[in-house]
Amino acid sequence: MRSVSKSWLLLTGFILFYIIYLLFGALVFSSIERPVEDKLRRDMETLKQEFLNHSCVNAASLERFLVKVLTANKYGVSVLRNSSGTSNWDLTSSMFFANTLVTTVGYGHTTPLSDTGKAFSILYALIGVPFTMLVLTACIQRLMYGLVLAPVGLLQRAGMDPRPATVVHFLLLLVLVVLCFFVAPAAVFSTVEKSWSFLDGIYFSFISLCTIGLGDFVPGTQPGQKYRSLYQVAVMIYLFVGLMMMYLLLRTFHKMADLHGLTTYLQLPRCEDRDDLDEDREPIVESQPDDDQTRSYLTDKAASKPLEPGTQPSYNSINNKG
């Protein structure tokens, strides 16, 4: 019990430090980039007024104007009156940028304007990307028991053989992820973002959770959007939890492929090979303690061997009677 409490405390510390790291990045990015953005907005307004004051516009001056407008638009600064009210580098928007940076989603709609901001982005990502992967891995270790091992064991106790049980479990988990992290968010996005269709919401969710991040759809960028800051925070939470579930789904599929011999057939590395190499090492956070029901579907070898306090039950240790 003491080790479980320590494990939860460690995981909570990871998450809190991750939030603090995002806030730190948001403060630095906002302090560096917002003055540069404000200057660019003033320059674009001056350019617009100068263009309007010309009594006769030739092709060359129009082309220069368009080039400057398109360049500013690439950095999220528009000459349109209804688009110039909100900053791309306020605290919440900067935190949103930091989140997309360390999760490697990177929509590209907002990018650093200054050389200082670009240099800080490199240093920030060098630390933030590995740490984000560490936090995601720690969270997945805690979810493996409740969302993978226990449900498969329940299916086996209901009378299913191990291999069909893993397939049914994977399909159920896949349906859960699709409904909760693609369909439901798409309905929300199509409601909040007036210009998005339901298909656009599905497309955005897929592009984001696969860390492709094309940037053609970015939430919270509509001018005059209500509760924009709260909305961006909600999207950040969605991205983090969604990435965690995608990694859990991939790990579950890999372990199912191990059990069915697919990785061996394709000569791919097995998840359990890495587990065997690290069998003497404690996981980042300890998994749920085993109970008598969990031990009932472990292999004879695993069941006969006493589990170390820091040992996580293996998905492939399900009793293979087929």
Image (cartoon, grey):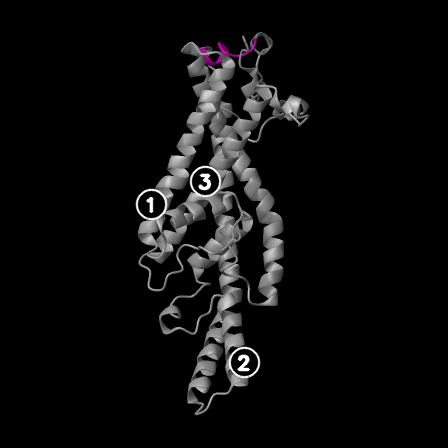
Q: Quadrant of residue 266?
A: top right
How far across and how far down the image is residue 268, in percent? 66, 27
- Residue 176 lies left or right of residue 43; in this view the side is left
Q: Amino acid at mark 1?
A: Ala
How far across and how far down the image is residue 212, in percent? 54, 48
Q: Amino acid at mark 2?
A: Arg
Give above or below for 141 relative to 261: below
Q: Quadrant of residue 217?
A: bottom left
* Residue 298 drawn in magenta: yes
Q: Magenta stretch? A: 293-299
> Spatial distance from mark 1 to mark 2, Cα to Cα?
42 Å
Q: Which residue is disc 2 drawn over? A: 64
Give the mark, 1 or 2, whose residue is nearer the N terminus: 2
Is residue 314 in view from this perspective? no
Q: Nearer the viewer, mark 1 or mark 3?
A: 1
* Residue 225 drawn in magenta: no
Give the mark, 3 or 2, whose residue is nearer the N terminus: 2
Q: Which residue appears at 38% of the width and 36% of the height?
A: 179
Q: Amino acid at mark 3?
A: Gly
Q: Which residue appears at 62% of the width and 56% of the height?
A: 122
Secondary element at image label 1 = helix
> Spatial distance from mark 3 to mark 2, Cα to Cα?
43 Å
Secondary element at image label 2 = helix
Would you say the residues marked 1 and 2 are in contact, meaning their CB atoms lie under 8 Å apart?
no
Q: Which residue appears at 46% of the width and 91% of the height?
A: 56
Disc marking residue 187 = 1
Q: Which residue appears at 54% of the width and 80% of the height?
A: 64
Give the mark, 1 or 3, whose residue is nearer the N terminus: 1
Q: Which residue is disc 3 drawn over? A: 242
Give above or below for 160 relative to 242: above
